[in-house]
Amino acid sequence: MSDASALTKAEVLEGLVSKEGVGSTVQFRAGQTIIQEGDLSNQVLMLRAGTAKVVTRTADGTEIVLGLRERPEIIGEQAALNGTPRSASVIALTDVTALAISAEDFRALVGSQPAAATAVLGIVTQRLREADQGRLELATHTVAQRVAARLVALAPQIGVVDEATGSVRLPLSQQDLAGWAGASREAIVRTLRLLRDEGVVTTERRQIIIHDLDALRAKVSE
């Protein structure tokens, strides 16, 4: 298998963007809104460093987390291609560095490079599959299972490992976790209390520390 065939769709797109030399570097602080839901699109962002969360809000203001984005993923591509308002907000979880590409340059790249069009189609298709999986989990998993699954998935993505203890610290509030697990904050509080009592996690202000990843993995399939 060649190196090119082993690349992910996002990596292929990153290479094509670099070759074209389009875009300019922008930076965002942790907690800063990168893209605002409802805004009209004028650029696509390709992440270079850091992690961001994609969120939307229900009619009552509840935040639902739709996913994470890391290098070399793109954000804002659908709105840039079809000219519609942003369908979700994107918020920096950590400090983020990105390449800002104008919607015009992005459309030109996709229109002139079949490999870019194929890569974008693959990215969109994968995100639709992830959305379908999320809906399936909401319908078939308990809150405890969803919480455990989210913590297990987030540990290697945004967790910081304590080399001395092996624990994993997540920069995550209980409200963040509620949005990720599709549960009320009250349900998250109850679930985390049980996990604390079992010694699986501890919590601090806007921090969740995982002490036993294996126990969390076991809870996903309970």
Image: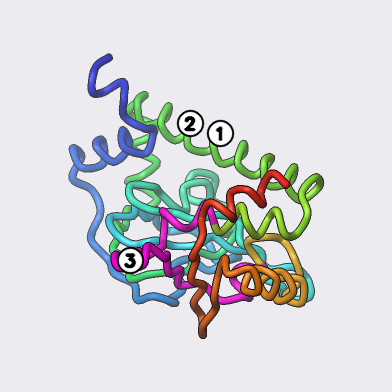
The stretch drawn in magenta includes residue 157: yes
Report, in whole angstroms, how far the alpha carbon at label 3 lies from the one at label 1: 25 Å
The circle drawn on residue 189 is: none
- Cα distance between the residues tagged 2 and 1: 5 Å
Q: Position of residue 150 (x, y in %)?
A: 59, 56
| SS type, badge 3 | strand
Q: Give the residue pinned by disc 1.
A: 125
- Colouring of the image: rainbow
Three-letter amino acid code at the position of disc 1: Thr
Question: Does the magenta run of residues contain 61?
Answer: no
Identify residue for label 3. 96
Q: Which secondary structure, mark 1?
A: helix
Nearer-N-terminus badge (2/3): 3
Q: Is residue 105 left or right of residue 219?
A: left
Q: Residue at x 41, y 65 (%)?
A: 167
Residues drawn in magenta: 152-178
The amino acid type, in three-letter code, at marker 3 is Val
Q: Which residue of the protein is positioned furthest toward the top in this rendering?
A: 1
| Residue 92 appears anywhere in the view | no
Helix or strand or loop: what does disc 2 sit on? Answer: helix
Q: Is residue 15 left or right of residue 60?
A: left
Q: Is residue 34 above or below residue 117?
A: below
* Between 156 and 54, the one nearer to me in the picture: 156
The residue wearing badge 2 is: 122
Does the CB distance between marks 2 and 3 fall below 8 Å?
no
Q: Amino acid at mark 2?
A: Gly
Image point 64% across, 68% down: which residue? Answer: 198
